[in-house]
Image: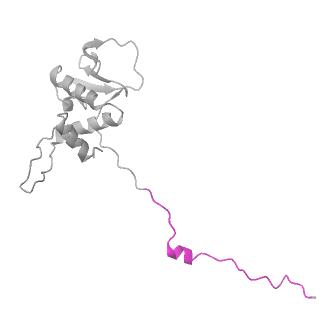
């Protein structure tokens, strides 16, 4: 659903970027149980996966989550969908937070300094939690044995009507 691999999720958990709601634990047989994510975690993972696909680094994602938690006292979940005290927006290069009063902050560069915007930023869009579209399976057109059997063959015999006799 998110497009993240199990290995990415393990690495994010190990680096304390994003931990699962119920962490994995060691089993008696030496393996690990699966990680479990709450619905809120899943929505946050969708946003983080989208940002990662857009080229944001893991360090930038960490900075974003830390800024939201420490400076604005909100979770990522509270900033998506427009219902919280802060709305996240991106232009593909930076992540901005817009407060209910209209103040805009660049959350990756200088999150404590409100920005003065004189013009609209091209391509600025609100971040939402959308599942990654599944890739469509390509349909290869292959000839089945039936289709080759039923093809019309051209007549290879010479046309006797056109022959003139000596």
Asked whether residue 160 is drawn in magenta, I would say: yes
In the picture, measured across the screen, residue 70 lies left or right of residue 101, that is: left
> Hey, which quadrant is residue 50 in on the image?
top left
Q: Main secondary structure of the magenta part?
A: loop
Question: Which residue lies at the image location 17% right of the left edge and 29% below the top edge?
Answer: 75
Question: Which residue lies at the image location 17% right of the left edge and 38% below the top edge?
Answer: 14
Q: Write down the region rendered in magenta.
A: 138-165
> Hey, which quadrant is residue 23 in on the image?
top left
> Which of the two residues, 19 or 143, is positioned nearer the viewer here?
19
Q: Is residue 111 above or below residue 52?
A: above
> Which of the two residues, 24 or 20, is positioned nearer the viewer here?
24
> Which of the two residues, 126 or 154, is positioned nearer the viewer here?
154
Asked whether residue 33 is drawn in magenta, I would say: no
Does any portion of residue 13 appear in the rendered image?
Answer: yes
x, y (%) of residue 129?
Answer: 27, 37
> Hey, which quadrant is residue 8 in on the image?
top left
> Which of the two residues, 121 or 157, is positioned nearer the viewer here?
157
Q: Which residue ends up furthest to the left in the rendered image?
A: 28
Question: Which residue lies at the image location 10% right of the left edge and 54% below the top edge?
Answer: 30
Q: Which residue ends up furthest to the right in the rendered image?
A: 166
Question: Which residue lies at the image location 47% right of the left edge and 61% below the top edge?
Answer: 140
x, y (%) of residue 128?
Answer: 29, 34
x, y (%) of residue 88?
Answer: 27, 26
């Amino acid at each position: 659903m998110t497009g993240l691999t199990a290995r990415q999720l393990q690495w994010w958990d190990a680096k304390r970027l994003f931990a699962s709601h119920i962490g994995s634990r060691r089993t008696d047989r030496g393996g690990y149980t699966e990680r479990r994510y709450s619905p809120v975690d899943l929505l946050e993972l969708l946003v983080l996966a989208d940002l990662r696909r857009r080229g944001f680094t893991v360090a930038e994602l960490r900075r974003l989550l830390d800024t939201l938690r420490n400076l604005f006292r909100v979770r990522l979940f509270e900033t998506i969908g427009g219902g919280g005290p802060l709305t996240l927006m991106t232009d593909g290069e930076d992540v901005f937070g817009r407060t209910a009063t209209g103040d805009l902050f660049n959350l990756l560069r200088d999150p404590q300094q409100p920005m003065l915007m004189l013009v609209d930023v091209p391509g600025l869009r609100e971040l939402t939690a959308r599942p990654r579209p599944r890739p469509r399976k390509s349909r290869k057109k292959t000839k089945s044995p039936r289709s080759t059997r039923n093809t019309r063959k051209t007549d290879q015999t010479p046309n006797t009507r056109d022959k003139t006799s000596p």
